[in-house]
Amino acid sequence: MKVLSYNVRGLGGGEKRAEVRRLVLEKHLKVLCIQESKLSVVSDVLIKMVWGDASFGYSFQPSTGASGGLITIWDPSYVDVWASTNLGNVLAIKGKVIKTSEEFVIINVYAPCALEAKKVLWERLSNFIQVNTHLCCCMCGDFNSIHSADERKGRGGVFRQAEADVFNNFIADSLLIDLPICGRLLMWYKGDGVSMSRLDRFLLSNRWCEKWPNCTQVAYQWGLSGHVPIMLYVDDTNWGPRPLRMLKCWSDYLGYADFVREKWVSFVYQGWGGFVLQQKLKKMKACLKEWHNQHLQNFDARLMGVKNSISRLEVKAEAMVLMEDEVRELHDLTVNLHSLARI
């Protein structure tokens, strides 16, 4: 599944249409979601100009005057779409992947700028998602909202925490996942070389991520629009960074559980829940790697050392009664030996 989202800021000019067509042909798209077409009417002729000679299906939401306008185009040889829903600032299509019969809903969004209007939209989308929890859900487009101050730069850009909280709560309450972005962090550029924000993104449901676990979100080069196109695709050959292999027997090693618990509590990050969890897991991975190197290197020598210490205490116990601290030492050494034996 390859889905591209692009706020074109007007699709009336031939240059914009040619740019979108190059993206379609170059990326071999299955679904294309366009925001701000600024078109009140969309025809087969126009769709062919941006999609190419291949077969297509499409749905659109007309603009209001010179503002807005959504278009969603798909490859009917790859997906079977049987419903299109216009929710106001939202165009949703429902269908299935023909090869696997996996049913999905793809939601094309162009959010308003006013906070009160966005609150209404978030509530409407939350209700729509709840009704369609049985489907793989992919939401994309221009949300005109950011997670945190890190997603906005430039002169005169005021960050409003309350507005970000509303957006973050919508994502959390809807159980959506915002994947890390590759290529670049910020997607909208004012043109002054200074002001920029991350307004465009993909938000995925758990069911979508379970079906396509290798999804990657990529931002491409800035073209004729003030926004950059972003694409969601599954790369079966790219499994990401090599994972840390955590063996179950490590948990039997003396002090391991306390180490993990203390480290996890010590990590403090600010931001929305998904970001905090991602950062803590990344930090824990580095700490576990260091712990592994410290405790499991020179394994044979350490195993022999534990055996020798146990043997020394057992020989002493044959001749006399061990002191209380020696009994505890023998017990700890025995537990340690069993842990090492499992490794």
Image: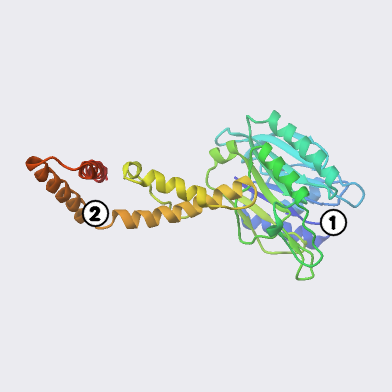
Point out which mark residue 299 bears: 2
**Can you give x and y, in whole percent of width and height, for residue 125 in the image?**
75, 37
**Can you give x and y, in whole percent of width and height, for residue 225 in the image?**
77, 61
Q: Is residue 29 above or below residue 102?
A: below
Q: Residue placed at 11% from the left, 41% from the top?
A: 317
Residue 287 seen:
yes
Other-residue count near label 2 (Cα within 10 Å), few / some / many at <14 / 14–19 / ≥20: few
Asked if residue 164 lies left or right of residue 114, the reply is: left
- Residue at disc 2, secondary structure: helix
| Of residues 62 and 301, the one drawn nearer to the viewer in this rendering | 301
Q: Which numbered mark, 2 or 1, is in the foreground of this view? A: 2
Callout 2, which amino acid? Phe
Q: How many numbered discs, if any?
A: 2
Q: Is residue 78 above or below residue 68?
A: above
Q: How is the image coloured?
A: rainbow
Other-residue count near label 1 (Cα within 10 Å), few / some / many at <14 / 14–19 / ≥20: few
Q: Residue furthest left?
A: 319
Q: Residue placed at 83% from the left, 60% from the top?
A: 13
**Residue beneath disc 1:** 12
Could you tell me which quadrant the N terminus lies in? top right
Instruction: Find the distance from the CA under tag 2 to the CA under tag 1.
Output: 69 Å
| Of residues 22 and 108, the one drawn nearer to the viewer in this rendering | 108
Callout 1, which amino acid? Gly
Q: Residue furthest right?
A: 65
